Amino acid sequence: MSIQSASIDKKVTVRTVQKLKGVEPVTMITAYDALFAGIFDGEVEMILVGDSLNMSFFAEPDTLSATMDQMIYHTKAVCKGARLPLIVFDMPFGSYTTPEQALENAVRVYQETCAEAVKIEGGREKAHIVKKLTENGIAVIAHIGLKPQSVRAEGGYRVQGRSEEEAMELMEDALALQEAGAFALLLEGMTSDVARRITEAVEIPTIGIGAGNGTDGQVLVWSDMFGFFEAFKPKFVKRYLEGAELIRQGLRQYREEVKSRAFPDDEHSY
C-alpha cells in the first residue's frame, strides 16, 4: 500500500492503521449502507458507520436519538458492501455510560456485525471504559475535542483548544486514552495547533475532522463531502462533488424523456 496506489488491495486491520503513523496519512469516510460502502471499498483505509446518519439521513437536529439497533442495522449493511477497509462502529449516545454497559453493547457489536472496532466519545473521564473494552478484546478509537453527543450539555458546537488551559486538558485526555488502550484518536473541531501538538505527543494515530492538516489522517461525512447534504456546510468540509445537483439534473432529464416518450426507446425495450 502506498500513496501512489490508485486503490487498496489488502484487508486493512488495526495493525495496518497503527503502522501508517508517520508513514502516510490515513483516509477515512463514513458510510451507512451496502451500496455506498461498496463504492468506497478499496479506496479508503477506514469506514466509520457514524451516528451522523441520524442528521444526514433521518433529518434529526443532532445525533442523540440514534440507537444500538439502528447502528447495528446500518453496520451490517456496510459490512456487506465493503471487504477491505477497517470498519468502525460509532457507539451511540447512552450505550456506554458504565464499563459494564459499554462491554455488553460492544460485545453485541462484535457478535452481530463484522465491525472491527468501536468509537466512543469522551476524554480521560472515559478512560476506564476504554480500558474495560480493550482488556476484553474490543478495539477502540477514542473521540475527543468537539463531541457531538455532548452538544446539549455544552450549549452547542464550539471549537475546542482556543485557550492554553483547554489545550492542556485535551492533551491530558489524549494521553490518558492512549494509556487506556485506544489504538487511535479522533480529533474533532479543535484548533490546528492543538491537534498537531497532540499528534506529536502520542504514539497512536490521530484522525482529524475540523482539526487541521497536522493529524495522521482525515475523516469526512460522505454526504457532506460529495454535496448531498445541503442543509448547511461546516467550515472544515471541502465538497469534492456537487452530488445533489448532479442527481437533480439526471432526474430532470429522465422526467423530460418520460413525458416526451423518448424513454424507453427501442434500445431499452424488449
Image (cartoon, rainbow, N blue to C red):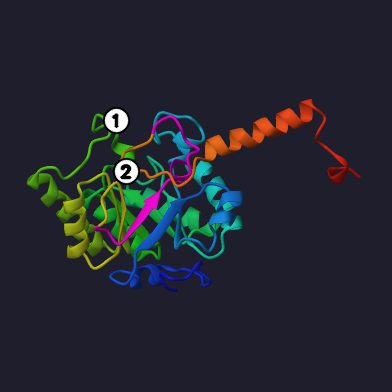
Q: Residues within 10 Å of mark 1 (few under 14, many from 20)?
A: few
Kind of residue at badge 2: Phe
Q: Which mark is residue 137?
A: none
Task: Specify whether 210 is left or right of 57.
Answer: left
Is the residue 38 above or below the residue 222 in the image?
below
Whichever of labels 2 and 1 marks the residue nearer the N terminus, that label is 1
Task: Specify whether 161 is left or right of 110.
Answer: left
Q: Which mark is residue 236?
A: 2
**Span colored in magenta:** 214-232
Kind of residue at badge 1: Arg
Residue extending farthest to the left is 164
Tell me residue 202's x, y (percent): 21, 64
Task: Specify whether 236 is left or right of 83.
Answer: left
Specify whether residue 175 is painted magenta.
Answer: no
Q: Which residue is mark 1?
A: 152
Residue extending farthest to the top is 259
Tell me residue 48's x, y (percent): 44, 52
Q: Looking at the rendering, which quadrant does residue 160 occupy? A: top left
